[in-house]
Amino acid sequence: MFYYDSSFIVLIPALIISAWAQMKITSTFNKYSRINSMGGYTGAQVARKLLDSHGLFDVPVELISGKLTDHYDPTNRVMRLSSDVYYSTSVASIGVAAHETGHAFQHQERYSPLIIRNSIVPIVNFSSNLSWILFFLGFFFGLPNLLNMGIILFSAAVIFQLVTLPVEFNASNRALILLEDKGILYGNEIKGAKSVLSAAAMTYVAATITAIAQLLRLIILSNNRRDN
């Protein structure tokens, strides 16, 4: 049966890595959420300070619900921070806030990987959903063309994940440099923020590995279906 196909083993390492990455970011963020910075800035104040230092006075910093839902919205040019980051003076919160301002700076400078990622979002949203429909139809009805189309469309999701990696790593590198240069964090506080951002980066690495593993599984299933 399809659901018990041995090709599922391809996904197991990726699923393990994803689970580990999620536990890592949660535990690391919680650890450094309990350590307040000496400077006493909240995440919202850090975001505002860094945005203003780059002339982004017109980019508002807003509160958003949820946990670790922090993001920069390039379409509306808005910084959104969760309450755990917005109000907190912890090392973890400041690191996250600075990371999101890194995305705002990328947008301001038209950083190529960010521009590419933003431009393919609508394509990925459409193709990733359609890919499964086409692949399953092709698999169950033995239609090679649909199988191939499903695989090609799913490849867009893999490309999106690959492009996301330099975007996220670059934003974190910018954040750590700015936090030290602006005197927002000091000494071991910088190391703590780096630990938080490194753990967050691993979730993107895990997502990329999972997407690649899923693509390989689709290719294996497609080949097995043709052989049968």
Image: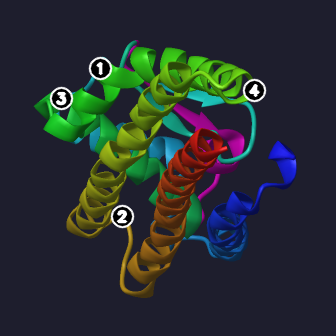
Residue 166 in view in this figure? yes
The secondary element bearing badge 2 is classed as loop
Gap between marks 1 and 4 measured at Cα: 33 Å
Q: Amino acid at mark 2?
A: Ile
The secondary element bearing badge 1 is classed as helix
* Image position, residue 158 (x, y; %): 43, 43
The magenta segment: 76-90
Gap between marks 1 and 2 measured at Cα: 33 Å
* Image position, residue 185 (x, y; %): 38, 71
Pick whichever of labels 4 and 2 is earlier in the sequence.
4
Q: Is residue 81 magenta?
A: yes
Q: How many marks?
A: 4
* Image position, residue 116 (x, y; %): 24, 29
Q: Amino acid at mark 1?
A: Ser
Q: Which residue is mark 4?
A: 140
The secondary element bearing badge 3 is classed as helix
Look at the picture and state if 56 lies above or below 94: above
Q: Nearer the viewer, mark 3 or mark 4?
A: 4
The residue that appears at 70% across and 71% down in the rendered structure is 16
Q: Which mark is residue 184?
A: 2
Q: Which mark is residue 119?
A: 1
Q: Which residue is mark 3?
A: 108
Pick whichever of labels 3 and 4 is earlier in the sequence.
3
> 34 left or right of 163?
right
Q: Nearer the viewer, residue 20 or 1?
A: 1
The residue that appears at 18% across and 29% down in the rendered structure is 108
Residue 60 in view in this figure? no
> 12 left or right of 175?
right
Q: Are marks 2 and 3 in contact (CB under 8 Å)?
A: no
| Label 2 neighbour load within 10 Å: few <14, some 14-19, many 20+ | many
